Image (cartoon, rainbow, N blue to C red):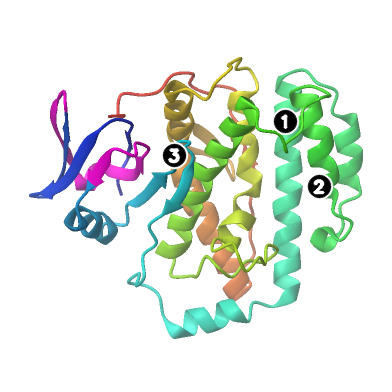
Amino acid sequence: MGWRNVIISQHAKLSYSANNMIVQTFEGMHQIPIADIYILIVESNQAVITTELISQLNNTDVKIVFSDNNHEPCCETVNYYPNNRSLDKLEKQYNWPSSRVNVLWTKIINNKIINQINVLRIYNHDTKSLENELGKLELGDTSNREAVVARKYFMLLFDKKFTRRDFSPMNAALNYGYSILLSTFNRSIVLNGYLTEIGIHHHSDENNFNLGSDLMEPFRPIVDYWLANKNFYKLTPDIKFSLVELLNVEIIYNGKTMLLNNAIDKYTSDCLKYLTTGKSIKMEVELINEVPNNALNSNV
């Protein structure tokens, strides 16, 4: 499995040669072994990528994310035929028992709210209100505690005037970070041989990634946590690079310390096994109060 998160942020030509991705820029030529790449983000609208490179990256399960004119992630590559996909597995996905779906969704929301509370505690905010809401969580979250908590959480974490509906730089950064998380979950779901379109809570015809949108919920507070102590007036490349590099931050999953991208793969596999087989599941996602502030050196 690759480990490098590559971001193309300038005029470049991307091609393939001898198991390497070749990146030609005005500054020179770079070679990156395909096997080293975990995710490729093409942020520049002045980049050219060859079909051969797309095919080779797809063969090694590298997710490619493309950005729009505003440099926001807008689409990604999806593997048509993962090696471990079967009709039997898809039929089981179509028929996941509602009892398991409800239990898993409840666990997901429970863990998400716990992590939101932990983020607030790290920044010394009063969490009593959120703890009260967590105590009201019901099977399947029929009373929609998730939405109630979210409204309180963001106003506590940022300020009372903060809303997720405006076009502030902070919201742009949150959306960017969530998009990277979602792409990582989509990759993991496809690697496990399942369809991203069939979710357990999200059921939008316009969302090709309903299942990824469901499973990623407990991990969103990691993005919030990193951004909460940042003061910026524009979503700069440094902020974007760092949000991508969050995939390499250490967290604790079920008592074990591991990199975020590895934890996502393990967590996704555990969730899908539970939905398909009913095998008992433990899912505890915990933050470590040490998040890197700088982009690492794997960016182009």
Up the image or down, 16 lies above or below 78; here it is above
Task: Kindly report the secondary structure that dominates the magenta region of the rendered protein.
Answer: strand
User: Position of 30 compared to 92: left or right?
Assistant: left
User: Position of 215 compared to 263: left or right?
Assistant: right
Discs 1, 2 touching: Cβ within 8 Å: no
User: Position of 14 compared to 77: left or right?
Assistant: left
Question: For numbered disc 1, what is the local secondary structure?
Answer: helix
Viewer-proximal residue, 34 or 285? 34
Up the image or down, 281 lies above or below 276; here it is above
Q: Residues within 10 Å of mark 3 (few under 14, many from 20)?
A: few
Q: Amino acid at mark 2?
A: Ala
Residue at label 1?
Answer: 118
Nearest to the eye among marks 2 and 3: give it: 3
* Of the image marks 1 and 3, the number of the one nearer the N terminus: 3
Nearest to the eye among marks 1 and 3: give it: 3
The boundaries of the magenta stretch are 26-48
Question: What quarter of the picture does the C terminus occupy?
Answer: top left
Marks counted in the figure total 3
Residue 227 in percent (x, y) is at 60, 25
Q: CA distance from mark 1 to mark 2?
A: 17 Å
Nearest to the eye among marks 1 and 2: give it: 2
Residue at label 3?
Answer: 69
Q: Residue at horizontal 57%, vertical 31%?
A: 173
Residue at label 2?
Answer: 147
Q: Residue at horizontal 48%, vertical 61%?
A: 189
Question: For numbered disc 3, what is the local secondary structure?
Answer: loop
Asked which quadrant contains residue 209, the reply is bottom right
Q: Residue at horizontal 80%, vertical 48%?
A: 146
Question: For numbered disc 2, what is the local secondary structure?
Answer: helix
Q: Amino acid at mark 1?
A: Asn
Discs 1, 3 touching: Cβ within 8 Å: no
